[in-house]
Amino acid sequence: MTGTQKWAAGAIVIAALVLAGIGLYLSFEHVAVFAYERLRFGSLGKGQMFAVGVDVGIMVMIAVDLLMAWLKRPISWIRYPVWLLTAVTVVLNAASGAPRDRAWALMDYVAAGAHGVVPVLFIMVVELGRDAIDRVVRPDQAERDSIPWLRWVLAPVATARIFRRMRLWGVTSYPEMIRRDQELIAYEQWLKRKYEGDITQASEDELLPMRMAPYGYTVAQALAMPDEQEQAAAEREEEAERRRLDAETRSEVAKAESAAERLRAKGKVELVQAEVDGQTGQARAHARAQVSAAERAAELELQALDNAVVAEARAREAEAERQAAEERKAAAAADLAKAELERKAAEQRRAAAEADKVAAAEAGAIETERIALARKAAAAADLEAAELERQAAQKRKEAAEADRVAAAEAQAIETQAIAEARETAAEADRRAAETEKAAAETRRAAAEADRKEAEEDSRREAALADAARSRKEAAEAERAAAETRRAAAEIERAAVEAEDAAKLSPRERAVRKVARMILAKAVGVAGNLPLSDIQRDLEVSPGTASEYRQEAAELLAGGYRP
């Protein structure tokens, strides 16, 4: 606003306030006195409070209405209480100027009307200010045209109908409303000409403009209503079909995801089972190794015990053989002594032989007592020699026994050495065999662990491969389902476009939809399509669904393909 416009607006506001003050001043006393005298308020003060309450209430509601309009949040219903209270004020002011105890004259009516001029004028100024504020703060709001007063005078009934329709259906343009009436009259005349004056012969669709005119429809809108409703019904069917397909898709996806989750869970379970089996196998292998080691230790301990017993027996045998060898040694010493005795005996025999020779010589010379004594001595010597020979034979026998025992002892000593050597070799062989067996057991346990680990890796790789294959199969199934849905949607869209181009009736559209359902769900065999699917998709009764299926079968037999 320019400076001049701001000054003009300020002057208007000041003038409106002055007008409001004048109205309050003029009506205050009249309403207060009338309330005290005629309305029985009891005292003049109470009448004055009543007048002030009414005027202040009007001003508060007017101020709130203007403020909310300025804030672009108008309260439409607040205007009606303001009008009502203003009408009450006008009536009270007019009643205060009514004559008492006489009939009404012309000037009485003029006086009563004069009392209501200022309040009505103030309300008009307030309404003008409200509309001005509304236009300033909401410049894009459509303005409502007013009906010329001359039309009200010339055609009050028809103008009232136009006013009612404009207010009811939000038509702000008076020329637009006139054009609608003219189109409706022209269409009605066309129907009369078509049916030679009897428009009752017209169809329901042709009579729609006259029937829908009171509800704000134009002729074009009323005539397009059946097609729009069919289009809306088709769109609702398509939306329902789309929701059903989406639900099926979500169900299939959920099933595929559930199957994939089950496979993944199964793979995890198998992986854990493989790990547990591997650990269990290793534990069992270790346990078996420990048991084998314990058994081997027991065997070795038992063998060592047996070896100790054998060694003890052998020690006892060696001690016995040692004692026998000592005895043989003693026998050898005895044999040596015997040999010495035999030597001495031989010497004695030689001496005896010398004595015999001497005796023979002496016998030849002297056969005296001396010879007899010599023979007696020789006999004694012979007896002693025989005894010595007997003892020597005994000694030789004992020496031979000692030699035999010594030979046996020597052989026993040699056998013991050989046995000890063999035992040492056997112990070395046993230790080497135990070492080799332990190494073989360790290698076997390691090979078993490697085999378990290889089997576990194989099972893990198989589980991962199964999971990957399941995910791939689920993705393939989802892609195939999406392709199928896309192809079905393309076929459905093409069929709907063809039906729209052919301007088919709703029944013909429904029959063609059933035919497409037969092709998609029943592989072209109408009897395989359940009536429940037709009832659910088309929202019809069982009888109508059966008729649709029969007509669709005939349509397919006639060569229909979407």
Image (cartoon, helix red, strand yellow):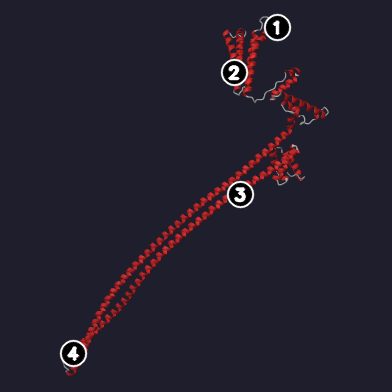
Gap in Å between the C-alphas at discs 3 and 2? 73 Å
Please, which residue is most extreme toward the bottom here? 365
Q: Residues within 10 Å of mark 1 (few under 14, many from 20)?
A: few
Select label 1 or label 3 by which is in front: 1
Q: Are marks 1 and 3 in contact (CB under 8 Å)?
A: no
- Residue at disc 2, secondary structure: helix
Q: Alpha-carbon neighbours of circle 4 within 10 Å: few (<14), some, or many (≥20)?
A: some
Residue contact at pointers 3 and 4, CB within 8 angstroms: no
Label 3: how many residues lie within 10 Å, few (<14), some (14-19) or many (20+)? Answer: some
Residue occupied by mark 3: 473
Q: Nearer the viewer, mark 1 or mark 2?
A: 2
Q: Secondary structure at mark 3?
A: helix
Q: Which residue is mark 1?
A: 106
Q: Residue at x 37, y 64 (%)?
A: 304
In the depicted structure, whether residue 72 falls above or below residue 317: above
Residue occupied by mark 2 = 63
